[in-house]
């Protein structure tokens, strides 16, 4: 019986670790638009690792699609 429980427990633990590594993050950022100058301080949800460096590229791309320039990612937090 012990031999059946050990692989199941290991599989469950690995599943939780994998889902935590791919969890969505909320990134708080500052951005701007020129002509006329507009500033924005907001947040958005991004997928992937929950680090400022990982979120920066994704936030920059999403903002650029809307005509905004990323100034800085201030913080990230897991959802």
Image: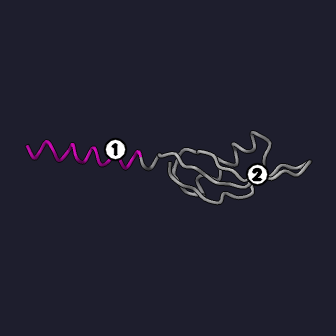
Rendering colour mode: one colour
The residue that label 2 is drawn on is: 40
Q: In which quarter of the image is residue 47?
A: top right
| Lower position in the chain sequence, tag 1 or tag 2 | 1
Total label count? Answer: 2
| Membership of 35 in magenta stretch | no
What residue is drawn where x is 11% and y is 45%? 3
Q: Position of residue 24 (x, y in %)?
A: 52, 45
Q: Quadrant of residue 71?
A: bottom right
Q: Residues within 10 Å of mark 1 (few under 14, many from 20)?
A: few
Question: Which image quarter is the N terminus in?
Answer: top left
State which region is magenta.
Answer: 1-19
Looking at the image, the residue that sits furthest to the right is 35
What residue is drawn where x is 69% and y is 42%? 62
User: Foreground mark, 1 or 2?
Assistant: 2
Q: How crowded is mark 2: few (under 14 residues within 10 Å), some or many (20 or more)?
A: some
| Helix, strand or loop status at disc 2 | strand
Q: Where is residue 63 in the image (x, y as percent from the top left)?
A: 73, 45
Q: Nearer the viewer, residue 2 or 38?
A: 38
| Helix, strand or loop status at disc 1 | helix
- Magenta stretch: dominant SS? helix
Would residue 50 appear left or right of 34 to someone viewing this image? Answer: left
Looking at the image, the residue that sits furthest to the left is 1
Q: Distance between the residues labelled 1 and 2?
A: 38 Å
Would residue 46 appear left or right of 79 to someone viewing this image? Answer: right
Q: Mark on residue 15? A: 1
Q: Where is residue 10 in the image (x, y as percent from the top left)?
A: 25, 48
Are the residues flagged by discs 1 and 2 in contact, CB closer than 8 Å?
no
Q: Nearer the viewer, residue 69 or 3?
A: 69
What residue is drawn where x is 80% and y is 42%? 67
| Membership of 8 in magenta stretch | yes
What residue is drawn where x is 15% and y is 44%? 5
């Amino acid at each position: 019986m012990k031999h059946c429980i050990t692989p199941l427990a290991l599989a469950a633990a690995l599943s939780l670790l994998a889902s935590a590594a791919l969890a969505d993050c909320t990134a708080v950022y500052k951005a701007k638009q020129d002509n006329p100058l507009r500033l924005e301080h907001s947040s958005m949800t991004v997928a992937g690792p929950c680090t400022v460096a990982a979120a920066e590229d994704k936030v920059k791309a999403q903002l650029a699609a809307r005509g905004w320039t990323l100034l800085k990612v201030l913080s990230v937090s897991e959802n």
